């Protein structure tokens, strides 16, 4: 096998490991499998089901993205960044 093919093989395997890691599998395990199976592992990794931990992480990120980023100031009623302690418009102290 020529060196370029070996590099490609490892590259594909490494990518497969990365995909598997994104789905919640151990990155080390994924990369080792990748080096053994090369492009085949990349294909397998693409179709692997997500682990429970990865699904939970996804949901957490979705909730974070859906959280309100704007709030109304109780003092002047203007829209201010969510979580502000003092209103930038009227300097109303927002206690939580
Ligand atoms: Zn205000």
Image (tube, rainbow, N blue to C red):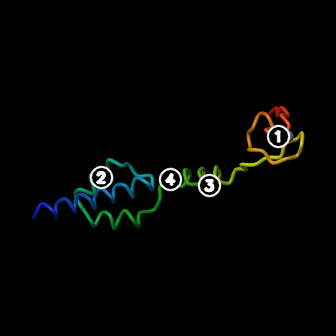
Q: CA distance from mark 1 to mark 4?
A: 41 Å
Residue labelled with disc 2: 31
- Disc 1 and disc 4 in contact, CB within 8 angstroms: no
Q: x, y percentage for residue 78?
A: 85, 47
Assign the C terminus to one quadrant of the image. top right
- Disc 2 and disc 1 in contact, CB within 8 angstroms: no
Going from the N terminus, do you reach mark 1 or mark 4 first?
Answer: 4
Mark 4 beta carbon near ligand 1 (under 8 Å): no
Vertical relation: 95 (above or below) 79 = above
Residue labelled with disc 1: 89
- Give the farthest residue toward the left: 1
Mark 1 beta carbon near ligand 1 (under 8 Å): yes
Going from the N terminus, do you reach mark 3 or mark 4 first?
Answer: 4
Q: x, y percentage for residue 77?
A: 88, 46
Mark 3 vs mark 4: in front? 3
State the residue at coordinates (30%, 63%): 41
Going from the N terminus, do you reach mark 4 or mark 2 first?
Answer: 2
Mark 3 beta carbon near ligand 1 (under 8 Å): no
Q: Secondary structure at mark 4?
A: helix
Graded by Cα atoms within 10 Å as few (under 14), some (14 to 19) or many (20 or more), the crowding at tag 3 reads few
Q: CA distance from mark 2 to mark 1?
A: 53 Å
Going from the N terminus, do you reach mark 2 or mark 1 first?
Answer: 2
Quarter location, residue 76? top right
Residue labelled with disc 4: 54
Q: CA distance from mark 4 to mark 2?
A: 18 Å
């Amino acid at each position: 096998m020529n060196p370029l093919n070996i590099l490609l093989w490892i590259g594909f395997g490494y990518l497969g490991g990365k995909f598997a890691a994104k789905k919640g599998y151990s990155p080390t395990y994924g990369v080792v499998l990748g080096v053994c199976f090369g492009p085949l592992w990349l294909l397998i990794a693409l179709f692997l089901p997500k682990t429970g931990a990865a699904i939970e992480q996804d949901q957490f990120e979705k909730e974070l993205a859906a959280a309100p980023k704007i709030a109304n100031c109780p003092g002047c009623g203007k829209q201010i960044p969510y979580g502000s302690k003092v209103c930038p418009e009227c300097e109303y102290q927002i206690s939580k």
